[in-house]
Image: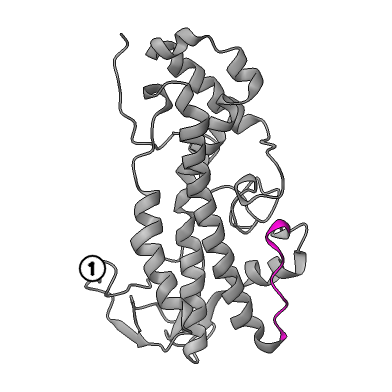
Amino acid sequence: MQIYLKPRPISRKYGHSNYLTFKYPFDNYGPFFADYGTIPSDATEVYTVRPSSPLPASLSKLYNELLPSFDAEVPDPNKLPRSKWGGGLLQLAVAKVDSSFYFQLECEDHIVRLVKGDRAPAPPPTSRRTADLSPEWYKIVYSTLLRGEVEVRDDADLELFVWAYLYSKANRVHIWRGLRAEMIQLTKPFFAAHLPSAYTDNSGLLKAASAIASVFATKTPIEPPPLTPSSMDENKPPLLFPSSSSSHTGDVDSDDDNRPFRRRNRIVSSDQ
């Protein structure tokens, strides 16, 4: 497998430019892959790596399945009846977030194995994939994602870099997290019981309800069942992302930008 990188400046640490930068968002210099998008003209450094068997399949899954799925238009609850909120929109958002969650778990497993080799600890069960419950595991994961400049010595360094890159790219699910948070609020029994059916017939009222739910989604904690992937926050190092309460935290955006649908490509409708 060939990996393309843009030239890096001379490292003060190593005195040369043959190094990799483990720093979010992992795309200042690459990597780029010939089978997945156009190689930038300035990505002139080519590395050939013989990766472990899962890496090509995971690379294909990210580019051919996950990223197109995450980049799809986010449905607007204002356009759908309330009957579609819980069984439709919420389930859709949960499925998107869970696909990212499980993909990142796979990346974590390979990151730890490459870093620790024969001394790698067993992966924690899914229900314990938080920094609070598995601190030693996430100490390895997060310290790797934040390593900074790492000299290229062999294929293992390159493969580790690609797994870290895949992990970071799976975070593109962030807009769907916003939809999930909003739909959890809109479908809570109290909220739904106090939302008149007339709201579905008046787009202005429904937009107001959606805005209120967005505020609740960002200002109050979401407390669905604790042992399912969709109930956990997303897998990001606390030092990379603010407001972290577990290993799976929010995005790099500010509070305003991180509100649900702040960056959704919304279909604007006129009030009837």
Colour convention of the picture: one colour
* Nearest the eye: 99 or 140: 99
Tally of marks: 1
Task: Identify the image quadrant of residue 140.
Answer: bottom right
Identify the residue under disc 1. 38
Helix, strand or loop at label 1? It is loop
Task: Identify the image quadrant of residue 59.
Answer: bottom left
Q: Position of residue 58 (x, y in %)?
A: 44, 70
The vertical placement of 183 against 190, above or below, is below
Q: Position of residue 153 (x, y in %)?
A: 50, 92
* Nearest the eye: 145 or 68: 68
Would residue 11 be visible to someone looking at this image? no
The residue drawn where x is 43% and y is 86% is 18
Q: Main secondary structure of the magenta part?
A: loop
Q: Position of residue 99 (x, y in %)?
A: 50, 55
* Nearest the eye: 33 or 226: 226
Q: Quadrant of the C terminus?
A: top left
Magenta stretch, residue numbers: 119-127
The vertical placement of 73 against 115, above or below, is above
The vertical placement of 204 against 45, above or below, is above
* 36 in the magenta segment: no
* Nearest the eye: 59 or 146: 59
* 121 in the magenta segment: yes
Q: Position of residue 271 (x, y in %)?
A: 32, 11
The vertical placement of 78 against 164, above or below, is above
The residue drawn where x is 50% and y is 22% is 211
